[in-house]
Amino acid sequence: MQRVTVLGAGSFGTALAQLMGQQGLDVRMWMRNSERAATIQATRKNPQTLQEFTLSERIFATGDMEEALHGAEGIVLAIPSQSARSVLKATKLPEVPLVLAAKGIENESLMTVDEVVADVLGKDVRDRTLTLSGPSFAREMMRCEPTAVALACRDLRLADTVSARISGGFFRAYTTTDVIGVELGGALKNVMAIAAGAVTGMGLGDNARAALITRGLAEITRLAVSKGAHPMTLAGLSGFGDLVLTCTGGLSRNRAIGEALGRGKSLDEAIAEVKQVVEGIRTTESAYQLAKQLDVDAPITSAVYRVIYEGANARKEVANLLMRPLKRELEY
């Protein structure tokens, strides 16, 4: 695998393109905006995100999908999860390994991105579809700061091959066959990060945030296991690792949204303050509906849903959580 196409030029897509360029791969990065692609080609800067970094000369930016996919030996899907279906339907992808870097659950179908891919392209694609997720802020990756992620595929040999090609230097990808566990850990942690941010915004202290993160992990695990995940996957990089980073890290957009809500901002005001795509807002709706569909107890997700979509008071939701009946810690 020498030529790779990255579909999406947001923060994470740009960071992955940079990583693969640094690993000696030839990268074509597709985006909808041809003018932005031309700017990247001319300046080696992405004018929309991570503007302070100079992009690898191995990255070729284009707004032409056919040009982007020509000769691709691997594809990375790094677009918002809610856009995955429309892009896949409009594009004829070559039959090469497909790495999913989008984190979310489709609102209409309650499918994960891997499930959406199989729904659009057929179930045969699953043996060459990989999911990449873990604690990986794009800006820190651009600074070449040590980063470790999980890379899941039903074909473990393919996962090992791709991992060997993209790992090196500051970056490590650990492989697994638990696709659904890696996907749901990456998606659901965004909901918990909004809750953790709200706890910080309300000034409730570190004890409260630690409790929220821990009980949030239990909730994520219940949901993921009900979909067939191995519980230990959620104790790994794509679960606990990503959860801790997103709930506490200063670069977390989901935490920032929650913090603004905790300070009493409206959702629109919070979004305007963050100024970037925040997957957790849409994922909260999907996760809430998925928990109802699977009959899984999800009190934190439900509280975040009520704050975002029903205008509930965040402090009252915290009080309600604290008044829930006591239970054994490891009841899943």
Image: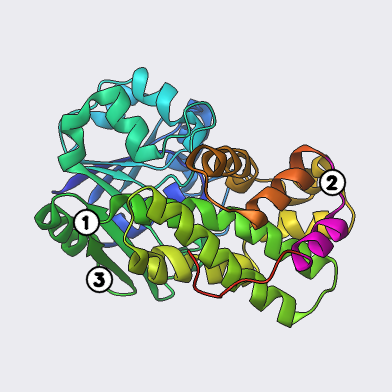
Q: Which numbered disc flags the more N-terminal residue, 3 or 2?
A: 3
Q: Is residue 175 above or below residue 71?
A: below
Q: Which is closer to the viewer, label 3 or label 2? A: 2
Q: Considering the whole magenta stretch, tell me its main secondary structure.
A: helix
Q: Is residue 244 above or below residue 206?
A: above
Residue at 17%, 41% in the rendered image: 128
Instruction: Tell me the kind of residue under disc 2.
Output: Ala
Magenta part of the chain? 311-323
Residue at 49%, 46% in the rendered image: 43
Question: Looking at the picture, how far across and down is residue 85, in whole percent?
Answer: 41, 26
The reply to whether residue 171 is visible in this rendering is yes
Q: Which residue is mark 2?
A: 312
Residue at 33%, 55% in the rendered image: 229
Question: Looking at the picture, how far across and down is residue 194, in whole percent?
Answer: 68, 57
Element on which disc 3 rests = loop
Q: Is residue 115 above or below residue 278?
A: above
Taking 164 as reference, is 196 left or right?
right
Q: Is residue 134 above or below residue 49?
A: below
Instruction: Tell me the kind of residue under disc 1.
Output: Thr
Q: Which residue is mark 1?
A: 177
Residue at 79%, 44% in the rendered image: 272
